[in-house]
Amino acid sequence: MPKPKAKAKQKLTHFDDRGAAHMVDVGGKPETERVGIASGRIEMGPATQEAIRGGEIGKGDVLGVARLAGIQAAKRTADLIPLCHPLRLTGVDVDFAFAGRDAVAIRATVRAFDRSGVEMEALAAVSAAALTIYDMCKAIDRGMTINGVQLEEKRGGKSGTWRRRA
């Protein structure tokens, strides 16, 4: 039986021919509709989740503030990640769901009509939303953990659509 062909070594686009980091030139790429969807979760004690549900956190509406933090992070991703391009976002949705008795699931969908994808913006949105929940609830639960931050789907651009397998 013939050996499967080895995959060609893929070049990392954020490094030049000398191996130095650089910002990719996207000037010649066409503007297309881009979508990035990311998810993650923050695990906590059941009492913390109950306090969030009941609006009993003294700092205010935890999920409302976390949603705003996620939107702001998506808009400011190029300021946080050195080689990301500033993009003209056309929409950002950050949604939450209570997962079991001890977690909050986070999902961010970011859209743009631009020359570069919005995967990093979606991941930044989920991360900032989770960190904001942590910040607002840490007085009652310092043991919270943020995990599973991952890209679920990206659409648009030269590489087309990619979806995480279940």
Image (tube, rainbow, N blue to C red):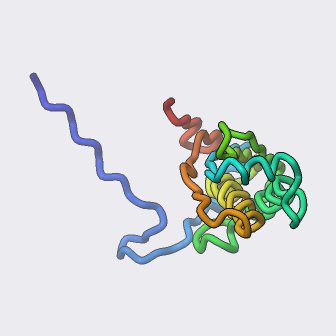
Where does the image place residue 131, in percent across and percent down from the top left? 68, 64
153 or 69, which is in the foreground?
69
Q: Residue furthest left?
A: 1
State left or right for residue 98 relative to residue 12: right
State left or right for residue 48 relative to residue 59: left
State left or right for residue 150 relative to residue 112: left
11 or 90, which is in the foreground?
90
Observer able to see residue 12: yes
Residue name at image x 57 percent, y 52 percent:
149
Q: Find residue 3 and report its image quarter.
A: top left
Q: Find residue 79 and report its image quarter.
A: bottom right
Q: Find residue 33 and report its image quarter.
A: top right
56 or 87, which is in the foreground?
56
State left or right for residue 26 relative to residue 72: left
Where does the image place residue 65, in percent across and percent down from the top left? 85, 60
Residue name at image x 74 percent, y 63 percent:
137
Q: Residue furthest top?
A: 1
Where does the image place residue 36, in percent across and percent down from the top left? 66, 45
**Is 158 rendered above or below residue 62?**
above
Residue name at image x 12 percent, y 26 percent:
2
